[in-house]
Amino acid sequence: MSEIIKNTEEQQLFGHPKGLFYLFFAELWERFSFYGMRALLTLYMVQEIFKAIVERDAATAVVYASYGSLVYASTVIGGRISDKILGMRSSIFLGGILMAIGHFVLAIENNTAFFLALAFIVVGNGFFKPNISTFVGSLYEDGDDRKDSGFTIFYMGINIGGWIAPLLCGWLAAEYGWHYGFGLAGIGMLAGLIFFWSGIKKNVFGNKGLPPNQEVYEKPVLGIPQKTVIPIIAVLCVPLIAYILSSYKAIAGGESFLGDETIVGLIFKIIGVAVVVFLGKIMLESTPDERKKLFMAVLITFFMTLFWGFHELSGSVITLFASRNVDLSGIMTASQTNSLNSMFIILLAIPISLLWAFLSKRNLNPRTPYKFGLGLLFAGLSFYILSISKGSADENGMVPFMYLFAMYFIISVGELFMSPVGLSKITDLSPKRIVAFMMGIWFLSSAYAFQIVGFISKQLAVESTDTNVGGLQTLEIYTNGFELIAHYAIGAGILVLLFSPLMKKLMGNVH
């Protein structure tokens, strides 16, 4: 018994499980790769991939939204495969390797390679993202008061990668070419895998993250163990996803056999129905208490979808707004503005984490529904700041950088009210037998959010191959759109606050 206690003590660092900090660095470098690539993606498509297409903004919006949707939708499948067969460790390794391949393929100057690279990242993220987040939750026992702060620390690791990556990858892309920036993102992914492997070798995770059933893990399919079959199938899915991403009416300039529907849009309708049916089955099999908590997990996920739908415009419309209508002279490039959100998360994560701890000691810590309502209000305010920037525009339609700076500060506060708290509550509200699947559903909220991003981005598209479209024209389009977004976000926040007392009852003893 004393040996067990001693081992437990040795596995603690700064009051948290030591494994948290290995996952922190693994996720830091994975997010470095992801956000470094994302910072370049919209501008790269507008300026290179679709530069000869009149509707280049619309084409970029379709591909960006479809890519983002598939990246997060794949987490549902990856989470389920982890729950049933691979376990978290093997899933993280498989996903990391596929993503690294994708980032390096992006360094190849070829349009076919571009879509194959996006497909590798889509498949890889499905295995990596839900499992590393679930791994964090598994390090804490049920009811452990440190879990919220642990997830906030982990979330800060995500944003250190998200802060540094756009600055470095954006600088490389501006100085030496797009593909050097993409190549650096691939190196970041490999660094993340090395950190994770070192944690396993030092046994900081104990017996956590192993395959749930070794017999199933080794079970042959057509003479090949399932642990080998799954990576083979994953690689075979890459060309199909690349085809889906590269075959839209907006890109081809012709009529699609689906009419105005995109392939990804159709896929998401099917996924939505399948998820609802599966969740209904799970709820029927659950106890009344589990059923109430599962309902709240789904409701929290829905509100998060709205928030991410506005927040993820940072990688598309807001990046184009920064490029075309924000005076960045001597400050940073448009791609580098993607670092601002993560910079503010880093600065604010610990103070807000300490605020929750301070309020908890005095029984004043707001319950999750109130935090979600306030988060949506902050999102609305941030877009309102952008909408009024036109009042300070010069004769060329350029607005001061401070409006963009303030916007990112405010939406980052809203993000810290919602995302790390919601991430933690999903693990608390979900039955253990489906926790990775529910984490996949959580990330599916981002997938549907990207459909919102695509819709908004197409409405705010500037239809021209001319890079010198009048700045006052683009400013009018963007700021009118930002004002409308602000109204929707603020309205949603007020609605959540009004129904928070009812939601508190459904959550039971989960804070």
Image (tube, helix red, strand yellow):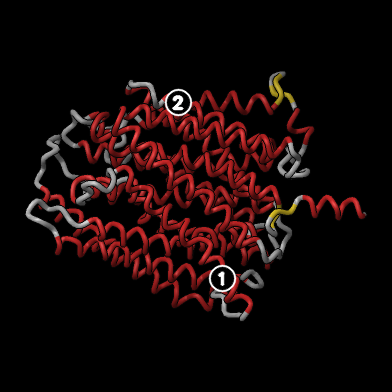
The circle on residue 104 is: 2
Among the 4 quarters of the image, the one containing residue 96: top right
The CA span between labels 1 and 2 is 41 Å
Q: Position of residue 24 (x, y in %)?
A: 59, 47
Q: Quadrant of residue 466?
A: top left
Secondary structure category for the residue under label 2: helix
> Label 2: few (<14), some or many (≥20) within 10 Å?
many
Q: Position of residue 71 (x, y in %)?
A: 46, 40
The residue positioned farthest toward the left in the image shown: 395
Residue that mark 1 sits on: 356
Q: Height in image: 251 above or below 352?
A: above
Residue for point 64% across, 72% down: 508
Looking at the rendering, in which quadrant would you find the N terminus?
A: bottom right
Q: Is residue 418 above or below residue 191?
A: below
Quadrant of the rendering where the C terminus is positioned:
bottom right
Residue 48 left/right relative to 218: left
Specify which label sits upstream in the sequence, 1 or 2. Answer: 2
Residue toward you, 419 or 332: 332
